[in-house]
Image: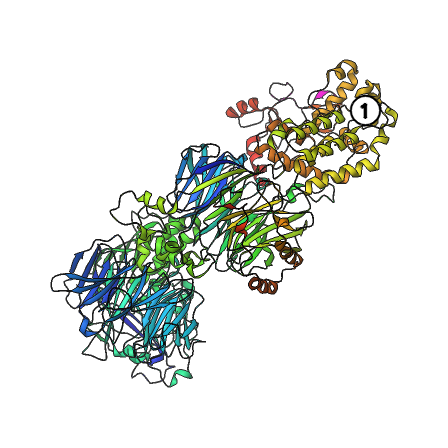
Amino acid sequence: MPPTETLRPGERGGAGGSGGAGPEQTHIIRQSSKYYEHRDSQATAMSVDYTGQWVLLAGRGHLALQRLGQDDGSLRRHERQSKYEVSVAEFAICPSRKEYCAIATSQHIDIVRWGVAEPHYEMSLRGHTRTVTDIDWHSQDPNLLVSCSIDTFSHIWDLREPRKPTVSLNAVCMSGATQVGFNRVSGNLLAAAHDGDLRIWDLRKGSCPTHYITAHLNRVHGINWSHKRETCLATASQDGTVKYFDVCNPRRAEKIITTMSPVWRARYTPIGNGLVSIVVPHLGRGENSLLLWSNSKQTDPICSFVGHTDVILDFAWRPNHESSTEIELVTWSRDRTLRVWKIDDNMLKLCEPSAEEEESRFEPDLSELRVPTPPEFLHPRSILVAASLPISTGDGACSTLPMARSPSFGGGYYRREEPHMARSLTDQPTCSLHHEFSLLNTNMPHVEVDTLDAIKRYACFKICAGGHTVILQVTFATSYPSPSAPPDFQLCQGTTLSSEVSGILLKVLRCNALQRVKKSRTCLEQCLRALVGAMKKKVAAVGGADRSQLLLQSPRLEGALSSTLHDACIPFPRTSGVHFNATGMLTTFAQPVNNKRLTLRQHSALTPRTFSAINGSGLLGNVMATAQRDANASFYLQERMISGKPGKQRAIRQMNGSPVVHVYDTSSMLHISRSMAREFSLDKLNIAETCRKNGEICRQHGRLDLVPVWLLAELIATPQVPHETLNELLFYKDPFKKSLLESLIMHYASSGDIQTAVLLACLFDKCPTGGSAIMDMASRLPPQLNSQISPYHTVLPLDVKSSSSSNTWQQLKQLRSNSWSDSLDQEVKQVQSDAYACSLIRRAKVPLFDQFKRSYAEILFGWQLLSKRALILKHTQNMPPPVQGVEFVTECGSCAKPKRTPKCEPCKRPVLFCVLCRLPVKGAANACLACGHGGHMDHMMQWFEKHQVCATCGCKCLERTSELLALLS
Amino acid sequence: MVSLVQEIDTEHEDMVHHAALDFYGLLLATCSSDGSVRIFHSRKNNKALAELKGHQGPVWQVAWAHPKFGNILASCSYDRKVIVWKSTTPRDWIKLYEYSNHDSSVNSVDFAPSEYGLVLACASSDGSISVLTCNTEYGVWDAKKIPNAHTIGVNAISWCPAQAPDPAFDQRVTSRSTAVKRLVSGGCDNLVKIWREDNDRWVEEQRLEAHSDWVRDVAWAPSIGLPRSQIATASQDRHVIVWSSNSDLTQWTSSVLHTFDDAVWSISWSTTGNILAVTGGDNNVTLWKENTEGQWIRINYESGTAIQSKQPSHLPHSHSQQQQQAPQQQQHQQQAPSHPGPSSDSEHSSNLSNSQLSN
């Protein structure tokens, strides 16, 4: 792939100063000068040796060396047997130990010396109790190195005394250390990052930190000391900022670079005044950017390095001992490519602070880089400045062309959703199609190049984005790229898009092409990127289900990296829990947490709050381990699983014990009892007798506290003047009984004994001797039944049937049927409202008590005592569910009153006759909404299977009904 | 008073994070870091009836739907997914619906009161809350999102019980259809927020501030119809706070239930809303009950009586907390250092230590 780069000198208002690009007005986009692809490598750590010749790629299964400068791309691989990922690997930085490297795996650090043929494991540094997260060699003393770990300690090792660390630095905090570094200039200072804080030690002053810096709100991913100033360092953090600190002034950052995404690393350039940062896009959607910043200007980067399609895992400077003007950057990414980038003196020059810097704060024009949605893209281009900067790279010349920019599009540097398509825009003047094809980035995400035929002047691409595939054929006219000859785009067979979407996409393509060729520029790459962008957008707009497909485009990233970066926001996993269910059963569990291995609780009595505290995989080194973890391995205890040891599950068991859940029955504490609920009686024939029975049930079940209450209830239920029917109403007007009963019910309800409260409320609910008509009839009943007959009782007493007149029977039956059915005739309502007159429960309290009953009914439902539940619900007021949709109301033929029942009760005649069989309808009925004709459901269905029109009037029932229903909805 | 019904060895390969019994108390669902959800028979300690696999990360919480919708279980996981499972028999489970529109770990799920239909609320570390409504007729799910519900992340969610019609008015006037859906959520911004559905949109109705660290769990007390509402919230700051309001849910008063030894992360109300179970980082399970004077007292599992009455040292302590009514954060902050680990409750023999009855 030929490297391409673009230099964008800013507009200088037409002023003649075109000699060199104004340093602050340039944004360079650069692709790598070399790249090596190692598809099979699973390396998680990378390091460049002192000579700058060798790159070490270390992974779980192998160590591999790649020689830079020799383009065969082959790796020297050395198998390695380890269960664990390599979290970090570092070559020594002193020349005397240039063949040494330190490789941290799990809790150990191996010192490896690279011989001629193969690596020799010299020693193993063991001292950490949790995963080692970072290593740094001392820049002056070849024997010293420092390591930090999740166990919060930073150990300084002397290779001459490898058995134990020479100095152990205790951070005294809860969170593990993520990064550590000796300062470059003197090597006396040491910085370690713990979550968002920095601890600075001065090795001359003992093992207590000399400074605490509350650097970031969120985890610090990278620390880098300045190569020039002893006390300066830069930190990169999850909170999306890079901060420059001077440890002499730890209270505030000197400078801050703000990006919208977490910053993984930030490192000073070894020469010059720059800093390179890796920005990790949120959730893998976005750009994997490597940016070069000037230390004197934080608003926008000097250069972005494009090419990696996945997250950049690490980068290193390639030492260059000959030249002092050029440096190279080596990056290793999850896309399994190793890339080398040149930073030449031009770029470094741009990093230098300029005199004009302060006065002319310049905002780069990123609007041009955005997805060119047609109308926006048509902004007036201002004067084209024909300043060209010849930049030579090691791999060959490439055109460096100016691009006009519009000053009106300001705005700080920020990141967008699909930014990568904006990056490596190449702006060429008229050039041959052949040239354009050769410059085309064949590594564009989502785009597969099928054919590029410069002679026949056409190209084919396969673009897979957003879960759809597009086969695009582009034909170029001979005059292309002249303003009048945009290429022709066609979507070919194999495209999985609807014609509508295809049309939109073609429009996007043509718009983009037109804009470019208007200025006689090539357009192919821009069009392809715009197409990918548009496809993603289309899919994103469709919503949730399709979006998941989008996420899957970078599954590795999705699965592990971005989520671990977010672990700091995820609460610490619960190790214990409680849960009550609807019937008073309590579930509890608790698992002992192994402090030493699992969490860092030795420093604090409190459980840490975030998930990141527990999970070492918040570090990149372990990210892949998490993603590919053994299904049997514990999520938290990966280190514990020693390979080759049989019975993995047993290993966990011994440590943790199998998690046990306890199920308790707490119903007695909640004052509810299933067995009592089953036995309680609500027989209203003799309320006093029922109360006595219920009291006895309480006694049998050990609820002695309730026995007196039921005694009291029995007293309430006993009429003072027995058999005195005429004074019946007086009984219910007794103020003492009413308020006593109410306060009893309220007391039990508020103290949680809903069972007793509801039973009392039901038992003394509305009483039968209500309306005057019934009153009269009741007086004719045998006296002992006077006050106790309940029409709501399911089973009517036999003697009522035998002794009462047919008229009474009829009335009672009607009342009963209405008690839980939906039909409420006016007459019945009358009776009901009157019933309050002879109820011991005031009407105002009825809704509240009904609510108690419903709650209790729900508990009974949970106990599956369905008949008891129905009995309780019978004592609630009718609450017909609100009718949704259309309801048929029939009108009685004789009294012309609307009826919801199949029969008009007062007129004693059926209200609905089937139009087909002419018989009254009792069961399922259906009718046309337009003409109103209808009848038995079966008959209607049979009829309309064959016919379109109504059997009676010729109305187009099916059509019109569906129209009406559509209107209603 | 509390009787152990069954001890179930879950045989999960990793830590268990939640266990919940279904409505009837017959089936137990557990979820674990091994990525699976297991179903057990709650009365028999035999092998799991079913193991539901579908998550790729630790499963944080499970929730049962009301049985009138069938045997439906929802689980949420670190892998950012919410899965709704349905069973025909306790052994056969199918994935009914999978929701993967969160950008970070989903920490909590809760089914709405059955009166509202099959509705599920999910709280995620991406800071948003999703409300998933199932049209049971067509089996179509509709998702509504409350973006930026809590900055940094939402840790817990709980539904307000279906509001009873106001007893002050005649019931026939206030029909049930006017019931308003409400949610309470707790997040990493130390806030507890109450959300109300207002014309298809969720609006923040109340913001309860009293915690000084992440809120780990929230639980809206079930209502038996009394004109009051209570919300319990548990936090990393070791406090459990009970918020009370009258029926109009506008004025909330807070009272600190207790300051625990460690972060508190799981609370649950009994079905009658008068007992609160609490557990946290110290792995002790305690039960609390409000007495008639409005004080929260710890209850003994065996006798069901108050423990703290026997401990005079605790009584003034809880008094001082009770008097603090309004949400005054300063007071909390002052209070936190003044009770550096209140005299350890573990000396009470009645702890459900390690979740096992030990008194």
Of all chains, the one bearing label 1 is A
* As drawn, A759 above or below A917: below
Instruction: Using the rendered image of the protein, determine whether residue A327 is visible from the camera's viewpoint.
Output: yes
* As drawn, B297 above or below A944: below
Q: Position of residue A262 (x, y in %)?
A: 39, 64
| Front one among B112 and A951 | B112
Q: Position of residue A826 (x, y in %)?
A: 76, 30
Query: Quarter of the image containing the N terminus of chain A?
Result: bottom left
Q: Amino acid at mark 1?
A: Ile
Magenta highlight: main SS? loop
Residue A452 among magenta residues: no
Q: Secondary structure at mark 1?
A: helix
Circle 1 Cα neighbour tier, 10 Å, few/some/many (<14 / 14–19 / ≥20): some
Instruction: Using the rendered image of the protein, determine whether residue A278 is visible from the camera's viewpoint.
Output: no
* As drawn, A961 above or below B333: above
Describe residue B28's horizontal placement relative to residue A7 as left or right. Answer: right
Residue at the far left: name it: A116
Q: Residue at x 45, y 34 (%)?
A: B87
Q: Residue at x 54, y 39 (%)?
A: A581
Residue A910 among magenta residues: yes
* As drawn, A384 above or below B301: below
Please tell me how many numbered marks the rendered image carries.
1
Query: Quarter of the image containing the C terminus of chain A?
Result: top right
| Front one among A224 and A257 | A224
Magenta highlight range: A907-920
Q: Position of residue A90 (x, y in %)?
A: 25, 66
| Front one among A361 and A377 | A361
Q: Which residue is mark 1?
A: A774
Question: Where, by quadrant of the figure, is residue A563 drawn?
Answer: bottom left
| Front one among A312 and A766 | A766
